[in-house]
Amino acid sequence: MSEPSEKVDLTNCDREPIHRLGAIQPFGFLIVASTDWLVVRASANLEQFIGISHHDVLGQPISKIIHSPTMHVLRNRLTIMRGPDVVERLFGVTLSENGPIFDIAIHISDGQVVIEAEPSQDGTQGGSTMSIRSMMARLDQADTLEAFFREGARQARALTGFDRVMVYRFDDSGSGEVVAEAARAGIGSFLGLHYPASDIPVQARALYIRNLFRIIADIDAPNVPILPELDEHGRPLDLSMSILRSVSPIHIEYLKNMGVGASLSISIVVDGKLWGLFACHHYSARLPSFERRTTAELFGQMFASRLESRERRLALDFETKARRISDRLLTSVADNASLLDDPTWLIEALADAIPADGIGVWINGRSALTGITPSQTQFAALVRLLNRNASGRVFATDHIASFWSDADPNSIVAGFLAIPISRSPRDYVVLFRQEIVRTVRWAGDPHKPLEYGPNGPRLTPRKSFETWSELVRGRSLPFAPAERSVAETIRVTLIEVVLRLTDEANAVRQQASERQEILIAELNHRVRNILGLINGLVRQSRGTTEHVSDFVDHLEGRIQALARAHDQITRDHWAPASLRSLLHAEAAAYLGKNAARIVMHGGEALLAPQAFSTTALVVHELVTNSAKYGSLSDSGTVAASWRKDEAGNLLVDWQESDGPPVREPKRQGFGTTIIRRSIPYDLGGKADVIYDPAGLRAHFTIPAKFVTFATGPVSTVPSRHHERTQEVLTQIAKQPLADMKILLVEDNLVIAMDGEDIFLQLGAAEVALASNVAHALELIEERNFDLAVLDVHLGDETSEPVAAKLRAKSIRLIFATGYGEAMVRAGSAADVELLQKPYTIESVASLLGRIMPAATS
């Protein structure tokens, strides 16, 4: 035979389209219906089961084959199906009145309805639920994993009746090992045998995750074609979820070489990954009833659930151990920070963490080694190699030669686990394990021979399954996933807590020193200004009164007015303060219970600190003069009103009425000078005072740059808290997030739920929650969002990848953080919006009002 042009290698089997073979096994039949229930495909053996040729049903309504009661049940089952990989089952149904009884499986493939049926077998077992319950009870009594696997094999064999049932576990490379077995006497044992990854190709392992059950009833039975073979797109039917799917010729040949007459596989899926299989072999044809096979599938799922629980408990034990070690490290360093410079101490502290034959520590170019380890020179070379190839992550191997080509071939060190414990320079803790020389028993030669077989230019399945032993050298005991998890916990502890303590303390001290210098300079500047202002008040007030007591009263009142203004400014951390609050404070100071005689009208106007202090002096003089000589000295009133002009300036009107007649003073005192000249001189505004006999009138213009206008109901209480509450109510009433879809990325459920409530109160139509980066990225791909709020730190990861994805899609985003603003901005875009934690509806509404003017104006 001439050689084909295609290169033969182990990937030929991996590329075989085992889910689109275009045929089924002959113990049942298959019908494919379109969404409008017309038959578009059927298996060639249809007439054998229902007496109607497949030629006669193609293009016909399926109601000509299946009568109404069964069609009603099928439609209902389709209605409750969720997801693409779901198969619904019906037992003991008829397709026609008084017709034979069938068991039916139904699923969706390529957008069409696939119906598979096989004759119901007599004497099917009852009490499946009770049987599963007792099986699980026996599994739970197993003390060890080995006993658990062994009991699982025994129970699966009792349920299926196959000659041999094996628990088959995959390793990271895809190779398998028989870890438990239950077999009929006299047929030998496969326990402990290994099988190469090529025995179960990649696409077969992927299919085992989707379709948890696979039956091959008779390897000698001819396949039944599905007709027509190709659809309008030129594709054979996708039989991934089929119960009757035919068998690859290569796999049939493989089973024949093993002497197997029938096989059954039940997937063991743990944590979403294919852990292994219940591999069942029979040495003649065997077809358990559909109901019993379904029970076996349920048993496999329950077994996997119990196995996952056991593995999680084991991982939890390791994690608890890691936490104890982390606590011990923290406690020790807290008592003696110099331990960080002592590699020997780290060796002692970590000796009980993960089983190892030797430990090496590399810190700041210094090293320490104990136990079975490489030499100092070799250890230094290994650290350099780790920095190039495994930088920043926990790395483990049980075959050091595959990672390090220059490793000493005569060394007994065969495996290691490296834990990075710094960022710059790179430091490591490395745990070493010695070589374990062992013999691996393979089920035949694991190296598949490069021969051409009867199935074309593909590898022929190996013909010999006699035990083939291989001496394994240069490998250590592998580091288990739970041990790697412990290593990761130690890495986080050492990097994020212990080894950064000194650097962070120095950085904090430096920042505190810089902030202190700035605060001292700013305080010095403000104190000098205040002293200068008070000095001016003293000098200018001198000579305005005839008596010292009056001078003291005037000066005291002006200083108190400044103090009240300063209190209001500093109460909000030197932020703009309310004009209304200023008027309330002055009215209360001079009128007490009669403060209501100053009637106020105007929207919410906030004055910058500089303007607030100047305006406070002006208002103080107006109130004082009115209380002494004007309408407030009698039974009159004052109307204080303000508004915004077209240029954004604040216009303030002061109108006194119903008081004694007003006369313009013959001499202009300091108080009058403050009223007339302060706002023009200090702020560049305008002031106009009119001595109308009916009552003093004054008009002021404060430039727009000193004023912030806020919308909302008018407050009548001089309380900043009340004003803020009104602002929030205004924002909620305006529903700034109306009809918007919000993404909230937060790793704490309680905080996430609280945030969800806040956004819904502000009008959001939908709030999607994600607790980690992976989930958030999935949601961004699946949905469209108008706004995203991201917690900066999500456990051991940050939300920066999510932010990058949102920026790429031009979605507005806000960072929520409990860290300092400067710290967050240091690693982010300059224009990033920050929401300080813990955030409230008040702070959210305030931020939205600032960054979303279109939504809140």
Image (tube, grey):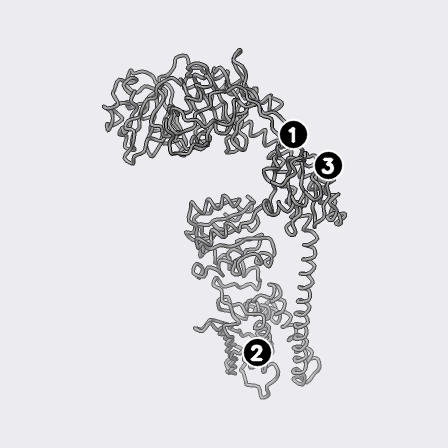
Amino acid type indicated by mark 3:
Gly
Q: Which residue is mark 2?
A: 682
The one of 318 and 551 positioned closer to us in this rendering:
318
Q: Where residue 750 appears, x then y in whole percent?
A: 56, 44
Q: Secondary structure at mark 2?
A: helix
**613 up-or-down from 720: above or below:** below
Measured in 3D between alpha carbons, the distance from the residue under mark 2 to the one under mark 3, in whole angstroms, is 78 Å
Give the numbered dot on residue 371: 3
Sequence-wise, the earlier of marks 2 and 3 is 3
Q: Which residue is mark 1?
A: 436
Amino acid type, callout 2: Asp
Residue 74 shown left or right of residue 433 in the figure: left
Question: What secondary structure is found at the residue carrying circle 1?
Answer: loop
Q: Residue furthest top?
A: 186
The answer to whether mark 1 and mark 3 are in CB contact below 8 A is: no
Query: Any mark on residue 566, and which?
Result: none
| Residue 26 shown left or right of residue 516 in the figure | left
Report the quarter where the N terminus lies.
top left
Q: Quadrant of residue 88?
A: top left
